[in-house]
Image: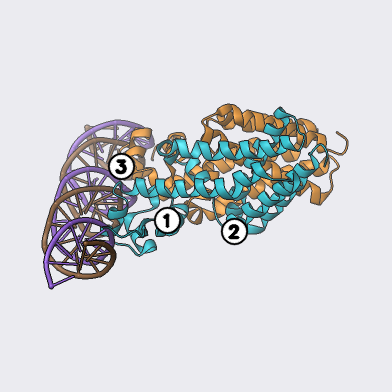
Chain colours: A cyan, B orange, C purple, D brown
Amino acid sequence: MPRTIGERKDAIPALAEVFRTHGFEGASLSLIGAATGLGKGSLYNFFPGGKEEMAQAVLDHIDAWFRDEVFTPLRRAAEPQAGIREMFRVVDQYFHSGRRVCLIGAFALADSRDRFAACVKDYFAEWVDALAVVLRRAGMGAAEARAQSEDVVAVIQGALVLARAANDEAAFGRIMRRQERRLLQALPRG
Amino acid sequence: MPRTIGERKDAIPALAEVFRTHGFEGASLSLIGAATGLGKGSLYNFFPGGKEEMAQAVLDHIDAWFRDEVFTPLRRAAEPQAGIREMFRVVDQYFHSGRRVCLIGAFALADSRDRFAACVKDYFAEWVDALAVVLRRAGMGAAEARAQSEDVVAVIQGALVLARAANDEAAFGRIMRRQERRLLQALPRG
DNA sequence: TACATATTGTACCTATCGGTACAATATGTC
DNA sequence: GACATATTGTACCGATAGGTACAATATGTA
């Protein structure tokens, strides 16, 4: 019998960091090897599909994380206000307050989007949808909820761009806090 | 005497398109050659610094274009409201209503940011600054003007991410229109 | 211990990368 | 036409890309 420990998943955080830092094209196998501490033998043992499978595994991992930690809690929040606040808190933490970039956002802008189109699309669609659900539950109309959700998800991605462009992590926090306040004030019974 | 016609600048639109589509790393010299119709001889004649100089030329060109067509008109707008409206119109046009990506935003997220840090940083700083100027001239307080400007520039970048992620150009227009309305309504004497 | 399977390092493959050298040619100016 | 300069295509360079082959080794089970 083979070992039951899947070492494969242990490599994913390091892989994520490499792709985040260098993009899909820029993440060479030597960089990947250095970051993970794994040689080609191991890498192609865990990911027979090569670089593409590695990136896909990272995207799946991110998707799952956001589903569990952001989208689902948002949809199920007992109290909409608290749910929204929690979303901003968790997201700020995930992105290291703007020091970390959104890999899926970066992929969306690069030509890697075509390669991973489904993942990239679903990620944002799910986010907008989950946020809209909680807004509706707070009494907001369907159209307004979708609009607000779209705006918020967009501005979070934009804040990451700006923070990284200016090399000013504080910008991310500022924008996030303003959006949180704005969104809470837009609630019907806020 | 040499020719006075600078063919160099004629190559810039095609170069911009290649970098926009494939990123800095992904834009290989063969892709660049195909897109511009120029061989290596010509490319290295016009851009002795190679790929890096090509990308820098593109960034400079974009910087200059936005300065002339967006930032300066914004600062000098006779009527703040009209100036803001014009900004949204020109920006929507520039980004082909969301079908085109912001090269500087894409560079900001990739590791090409480090290479072109100054350009990337100045572009967004200038944009935020120019917008803040017109908001102040409309009677808005300094802090509020900066905050609003930062939010708007961020949301535009985010809208590009979302539009491209969802492969839904319409999303860009929706977000832009909402932001325009929101910003105009935030004006003191709006 | 014996065996099957998983894991790993190393050597190697072809293709392409960014870039250089340079001769051939075009484009002026006088 | 003569001459200087600009422009271009082609051949070539070493380095590295992603990927494969496979023998050596570790690991787990019976």
- On the same chain: label 3 and label 2? no
Cα–Cα span, label 3 and label 1: 39 Å
Tell me the number on the disc at residue B40: 3
Chain to which mark 1 belongs: A
Residue that mark 1 sits on: A12
Give above or below for A37 relative to A149: below
Q: Amino acid at mark 1?
A: Ile
Residue B36 at x, y = what percent?
38, 34
The answer to whether A123 appears left or right of B5 in the picture is right
Cα–Cα span, label 1 and label 2: 18 Å
Q: Amino acid at mark 2?
A: His
Give above or below for B182 relative to A96: above
Residue B47 visible? The answer is no
Name, please, the residue furthest toward the right.
Answer: B189
Residue that mark 2 sits on: A96
Instruction: Judge the density around disc 2: few (<14), some (14-19), many (≥20) Cα neighbours within 10 Å.
Output: some
The answer to whether A89 appears left or right of A33 in the picture is right
Cα–Cα span, label 3 and label 2: 43 Å
Residue D3 image-quadrant placement: top left
Label 1–label 2 contact, CB within 8 A: no
Residue A105 visible? The answer is yes
Residue B182 at x, y = what percent?
76, 35
Residue A151 image-quadrant placement: top right
Q: Nearer the viewer, mark 1 or mark 2?
A: 1
